[in-house]
Each structure stands twice: as structure tokens, then as C-alpha cells.
Image (cartoon, rainbow, N blue to C red):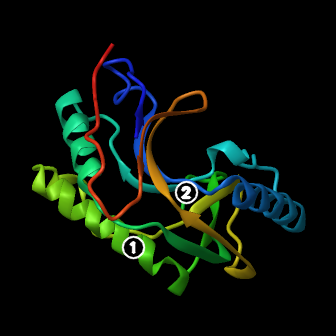
Amino acid sequence: MFYRSMDQNASRVGQLFLAALPDADAAARIHRLACVLKNAHRFDGNIIEPERLHVSLFSLGGLPEPAVRMACEAAAEVRVPPFDVLFDRSASFQGRGGNRPLVLVGDDGLERLRSFRQALVVAMAGKGLKYLTKRNFTPHVTILYAERDVEEYPIEPIRWTVNEFVLIHSLRGHVHLARWPLRSRTVAQCDWRSR
């Protein structure tokens, strides 16, 4: 695991969240698909850059530093081997008018991801953070923001192996503050410190 210290107010400025990231090949394929879909639907919205593509697991924004530290400790306790994910459809999510997320979703190819998030739910609850563990979780990768909705549509499946998950601070780009490799054995504790 690697850790970067961050400003004490980072969880209140920008976004702070745990996420799974596509590998470089999958991110490049997703980005190319986003370009195709943007042209096909004649969208004006911005495409998410490959280095910012992710599957959000938990939002930690607005939390005090001790709660973020406990979330990091919970993340470090999760023991899950690497697993594959597969996204096979594009769909629109609800959003503000003129700012509708176009996302990649899937069903059977995301069961292991759902199980992994449930392991995180159990670990978070064990640290007293049950209030963070919303039950509704729709795994998705946002690929662009559009001005209108489109129908769900099958895509050529995009698959990658999740080998780690990360703590991301998003303000003007994504900064990876901590990362936890997936493995069956216990991983090191998160060294959460303010500068």
C-alpha cells in the first residue's frame, strides 16, 4: 500500500472517495468507446479522461479526519483476492438538467465487485461507520456528461482485473492518496496523517 499525506481539509474540499480503477488497456478502450458514443448520439458534453475513469465504492467527502482514518483502517482490513469485472451496456443516469451521466453498467460480470463492496461495508460497520454504507450500489463507470438521456444499449464487453482499490481526492484532477492491493492475506494498515 502507498500513502500520500494530504491537507486536513481535503475531505471537505473537492471529493474524497474509495474507488476501483480500470487498468491502462481498459481505460483506453473505455475512452475510445466514449468518443464513439459521443459522436453517435451527437452529444456536446465532456468525455472523462482515461486517468479519471473509476468505479466509485464509497464517498468519504465532508467527513472529519478521524472518520477518514477509520475508513482507511477498515479498507486495510479487507481480504479479497483479485477479481474480474465486465461492463456490457451503456446507459444514462439521472443528473441535473443538461448534465446527465452516460455510464457503463453490467449484471453478471459485476457480482464479484458487489461482493467486494459488501466486504468493505462489513469492515466499515466494524469501525463504527455504518452510516457510510448505503445499501443501494449500482456499479458503473461514468464516461461522459451529456445534455440528455439515451436508451440503454449493449456494447462490446469491457473487462479488467481489479487488483487494488484507491482513496482518491478529486478537485482539479485525481490524486491517489492511498492504495490497497487485493490479496487473500491481511494488508498493511493505512497511515492516515494530515500535513
Q: Which residue position is annotated with label 1?
A: 114
Residue at the top extreme, as displayed: 195
Crowd class of label 1 (few under 14; some 14 to 19; many from 20; radius 10 Å): some
Q: Which residue lies furthest to the front in this view?
A: 185
Amino acid marked by disc 1 = Arg
- Amino acid at dot 2: Gly
Residue 93 lies in what quarter of the image? bottom right
Q: Judge left or right: residue 1 versus residue 185.
A: right
Residue at 33% over, 20% down: 9
Residue 91 appears in the picture as rendered: yes
Is the residue 175 above or below the residue 22 in the image? above
Q: In this view, does 161 lie above or below 57?
A: below
| Residue neighbourhood size for the residue with mark 2, other residues' Cα within 10 Å, grouped as few (<14), some (14–19), many (≥20) | some
Between residue 97 and residue 121, name the one nearer to us: 121
Q: In which quarter of the image is the C terminus?
A: top left
| Residue in view at x 22 percent, y 43 percent | 73
Q: Name the residue under label 2.
A: 95
At a point 87% along the width and 64% down the height, the residue shown is 36
Q: Where is residue 56 in the image (x, y as percent from the top left)?
A: 46, 55
Nearest the camera: 126 or 164? 164
Q: Residue 19 carries which label?
A: none
Q: Give the quadrant of residue 123.
A: bottom left
Q: How many labels does the image show?
A: 2
Which mark is in front, 1 or 2? Answer: 1
Rendering coords of residue 184 (x, y %): 33, 65
Residue at 54% over, 73% down: 84
Counting residues from the N terminus, which is met first, the one under dot 1 or under dot 2? 2
